[in-house]
Image: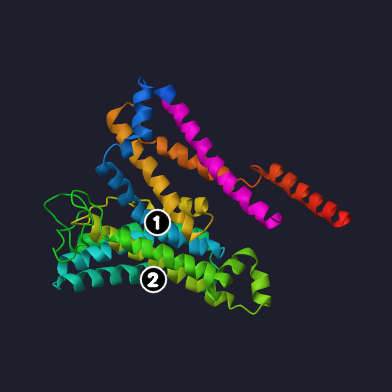
Amino acid sequence: MNSKTIEKRFDVIRTILAVIIALLIALAVIVIVSDDPMNALYNFLIGPVTNARRFANVIELSIPLMFCGLAVSIMFAADQSNMASEGAFYVSCAVTSVIAVLWELPAFLHVIVCLAAGTITGIIIMCIPAVLKAKWQANELVSSLMLNYICLYMGNYIIRTRVLDTSLGITTSLGFKETASLPNLIPGTRLHLGLLFVILAVILCYIMMYHTGLGYAIRTIGQNKNFAKYAGMGVGGVVLLTQVMGGALAGFGGATEMIGMYNRFQYQGLPQYGFDGMLIAIMAKYNPALVPVAAIFLAYIRTGADIMNRTSDVPYEIISVIQSAIIMLVVAKMFLNNLKHKQIVKYSKMQMEKKEAS
């Protein structure tokens, strides 16, 4: 064990403690506001596993969360504050919907074209903040956040001008062609083929990040960009490639969600999956192998909160309390910092004593 190992261990401990503290805060709020706290707590904590369909809902919800978590993890690992994954996801859903409604193609080919179109759309959207920064030094954090709202209206415009179902009076598309649909994996649920796609994406992203030269370059740039430059790494090219990969994952996730879960476009606003991807990436420490754990956890508490909201007097917004507490505690640099420092000092003293004894 060395100081680096100690730091990694405390990062894991800090994340776990942040989740536990956030849950305890939420439980305290539930006890205070509910007239029947035991019933509310039961539905929140146990409700998602009381039957197979509810647990399937957890996995269904985790699929887009995993795609967006992977997208953000790759970009954040390279120290790129591009937050356009929400917009990339949304516009990809809209473009996919147009193809699913208007195009006449054989079943297998129709699905492939929908997924490809969503992926390309995601790449285009995600690269916009990168180009703005490269050309005019625009702050990618600000430009990507603002871009999400441009994407909201862009997506709505695409639906309203191309495939709007005027009989419903809201921003909803006409029904998708039957050929533009991902097959279900388990009858009686909406668990679709996208689950296998995202599992494959997790495996490929992990291999890329920790077993290839590109992954090493991404992590090195994220830790010390100047060192990466002096080491001869093509920083600009690697950074741009992370935006492309992030956009591809978010766009593919949007297309998968649209033709896997729905038979028409029916979002009335940004679905927040891209923003949730940031929380998942932070919880996973930008490690693709941990993204499914963080995504399933978030999907679980959201499903539990939805069940609790329908069966008790506690509002669904309790999830906002949990998410906010997790973010504050995980990103707080001083949380457990003193304990980590003591452990590093203790380890250093032990090493010195061993050297003196030998």
Is residue 263 shown left or right of residue 253? left
Q: In the rendered view, would you say 238 is above or below 180?
A: below
Q: Secondary structure at mark 2?
A: helix
Dominant SS in magenta: helix
Which residue in the structure is indicated by mark 2?
124
Q: Is residue 154 visible?
A: no
**Which residue is most to the top?**
35
Image point (27%, 66%), residue name: 95
* Screen quadrant of the C terminus: bottom right
Image point (64%, 80%), residue name: 232
Is residue 356 shown left or right of residue 42? right
Is residue 248 shown left or right of residue 54? right
The answer to which of marks 2 and 1 sits earlier in the sequence is 1
> Residue 61: x and y, percent?
33, 50
Which residue in the structure is indicated by mark 1?
66
Q: Counting other residues with Cα less than 10 Å from the Cα at mark 1, is it few (<14), some (14-19), or many (20 or more)?
A: many
Image point (30%, 51%), residue name: 60
**Which residue is most to the left?**
167
> Residue 276: x and y, percent?
42, 51
Is residue 282 shown left or right of residue 106? right
User: Which circle marks residue 255 in the picture?
Assistant: none
Tell me the distance, in whole angstroms, between the alpha carbons under discs 2 and 1. 20 Å
283 inside magenta stretch = no
The kind of residue on which mark 1 rests is Met
> Residue 218: x and y, percent?
56, 69
Q: Is residue 204 visible?
A: yes
Q: Counting other residues with Cα less than 10 Å from the Cα at mark 2, is it few (<14), some (14-19), or many (20 or more)?
A: some
Residue stretch rendered in magenta on the structure = 1-30
Name the residue nearer the viewer: 318 or 138. 318
* Screen quadrant of the N terminus: bottom right
Q: Secondary structure at mark 1?
A: helix
